[in-house]
């Protein structure tokens, strides 16, 4: 037998061994749904047949606030804010297509996971709830979904909340900041995000157990926060392993930085919130949002990472409450700057 044939067989055998050791099948959707839904869970069927999971909580008479999670996350990421703000505001959270209990779109659905699909999902849900005007906020990828939706439907978005948000331009992440602003030590970013950019990894990731990558990614993104416990890791793992979701995440196009986008038309009051220790999207991006949004309040948390609303829910929710009260409360005094905003 030729040497090349032997080499090919050895490589094939090695790949089969690795596959056997690291292969992990999907979890039944019914079991995952039962564990991660609750009495507030609702479902809306979108035009393309996708079953959208959402929750509508808090004060039904309060200003509606719609919150969008980041990549690989779910609506559970906002539960700390929901608890803190529910007495005064109506909090609406949802699982985007390819995430959480929304999961995969039906076979044959057109553009089921790209940025336009997120805009359509947000629009369909808010229309179904009868919301003509609302505050829209998001973390990371959900922050990108927020400003994209606001560009498409500016009259419907009364204010924005951008939490460590995906930027509209590639160069924003390369903008230098001063030593005083750049307090973060060198951080190792989530390895999974880097691997997902590689076509070879995407080709095999549908079949491999992502457990180790998920745990490393969470510890990096959450700045080694103590909130990264077994329950949190299990939540991310089990929702990602829900039947069809791994494949949906790998199929998601989501090219958020394809071309420069001008945000100067977004004149809504905007709260920009950022963890200075963010290992995913550098704090320099926060200062670019500050420079490019005409009407913003920017807050930098020196000790927090990429998920401030879970790392410090009470502190960050208090700033959100101050921002919302400032713009939507019954103000009897003259306009005043919000105390926590950067000058």
Image (tube, rainbow, N blue to C red):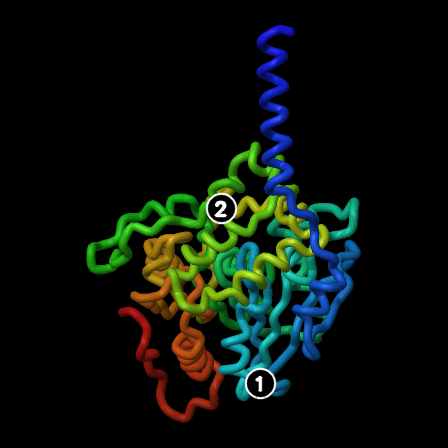
Tell me the CA gap for discs 2 and 1.
Answer: 37 Å
Q: Residue drawn at (74%, 68%), measured in percent from left and top?
A: 43
Q: Is residue 208 left or right of residue 314?
A: right
Image coordinates of residue 337 in percent, x first then y, are 32, 79
Marks 2 and 1, the one that precedes in the sequence: 1
Regarding residue 150, the answer to whether it shows in the image is: no
Q: Nearer the viewer, residue 199 or 128?
A: 199
The one nearer the camera, 312 or 339, is 312
What numbered label is drawn on residue 276? none
Q: Is residue 139 left or right of residue 175?
A: right
Marks 2 & 1, CB-CB < 8 Å contact? no
Note whether 255 is above or below 143 in the view shown: above
182 left or right, relative to 232: left
Relative vertical location of residue 224 with respect to residue 127 in this rendering, above or below: above
Disc marking residue 62: 1
Q: Residues within 10 Å of mark 2 (few under 14, many from 20)?
A: few
The vertical placement of 20 against 288, above or below, is: above
- Element at label 1: loop
Q: Residue placed at 70% from the left, 55% from the top?
A: 27
The answer, for residue 69, to whether it is visible in the render is yes
Mark 2: which secondary structure?
helix
Read off the residue under disc 2: 193
Q: Residue 335: name its quadrant.
A: bottom left
Residue 204, placed above or below residue 109? above
Determine crowd level at label 1: few under 14, some 14-19, many 20+ residues with C-alpha closer than 10 A. Answer: some
Label 2 or label 1, whichever lies nearer to me, is: 2
Q: Position of residue 206 (x, y in %)?
A: 65, 42
* Residue 65: image location, x then y, percent: 56, 75
Quadrant of the image for the N terminus? top right
Q: How many marks?
A: 2
82, 128: nearer the viewer? 82
Query: Residue placed at 25% from the left, 58% from the top?
Result: 183
């Amino acid at each position: 037998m030729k040497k090349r044939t032997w080499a090919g067989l050895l490589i094939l055998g090695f790949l089969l061994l690795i596959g056997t050791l690291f292969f992990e099948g999907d979890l039944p959707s019914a079991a995952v749904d039962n564990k991660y839904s609750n009495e507030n869970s609702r479902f809306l069927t979108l035009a393309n047949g996708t079953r959208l999971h959402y929750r509508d909580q808090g004060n039904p008479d309060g200003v509606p606030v719609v919150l969008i999670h980041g990549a690989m996350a779910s609506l559970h990421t906002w539960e700390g804010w929901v608890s803190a703000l529910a007495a005064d505001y109506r909090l609406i959270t949802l699982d985007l297509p390819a995430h959480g209990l929304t999961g995969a779109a039906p076979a044959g659905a057109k553009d089921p996971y790209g940025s336009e699909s997120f805009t359509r999902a947000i629009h369909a849900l808010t229309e179904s709830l009868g919301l003509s005007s609302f505050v829209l906020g998001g973390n990371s990828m959900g922050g990108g979904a927020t400003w994209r939706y606001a560009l498409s439907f500016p009259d419907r978005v009364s204010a924005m909340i951008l939490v460590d948000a995906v930027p509209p331009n590639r160069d924003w992440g390369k903008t230098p900041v001063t030593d005083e602003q750049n307090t973060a030590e060198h951080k190792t970013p989530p390895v999974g995000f880097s691997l997902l950019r590689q076509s070879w990894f995407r080709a095999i990731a549908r079949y491999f157990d992502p457990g180790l990558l998920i745990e490393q990614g969470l510890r990096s993104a959450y700045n080694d926060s103590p909130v990264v416990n077994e329950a949190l890791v299990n939540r991310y793992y089990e929702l990602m392993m829900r039947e069809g979701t791994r494949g949906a995440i790998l199929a998601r196009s989501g090219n958020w930085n394809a071309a420069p986008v001008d945000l100067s038309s977004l004149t809504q009051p905007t709260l920009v919130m950022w963890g200075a220790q963010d290992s995913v999207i550098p704090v320099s991006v926060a200062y670019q949002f500050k420079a490019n949004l005409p009407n913003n309040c920017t807050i930098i948390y020196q000790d927090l990472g990429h998920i401030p609303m879970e790392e410090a829910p009470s502190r960050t929710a208090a700033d959100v409450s101050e921002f919302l009260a400032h713009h939507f409360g019954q103000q009897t005094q003259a306009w005043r700057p919000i105390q926590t905003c950067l000058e």
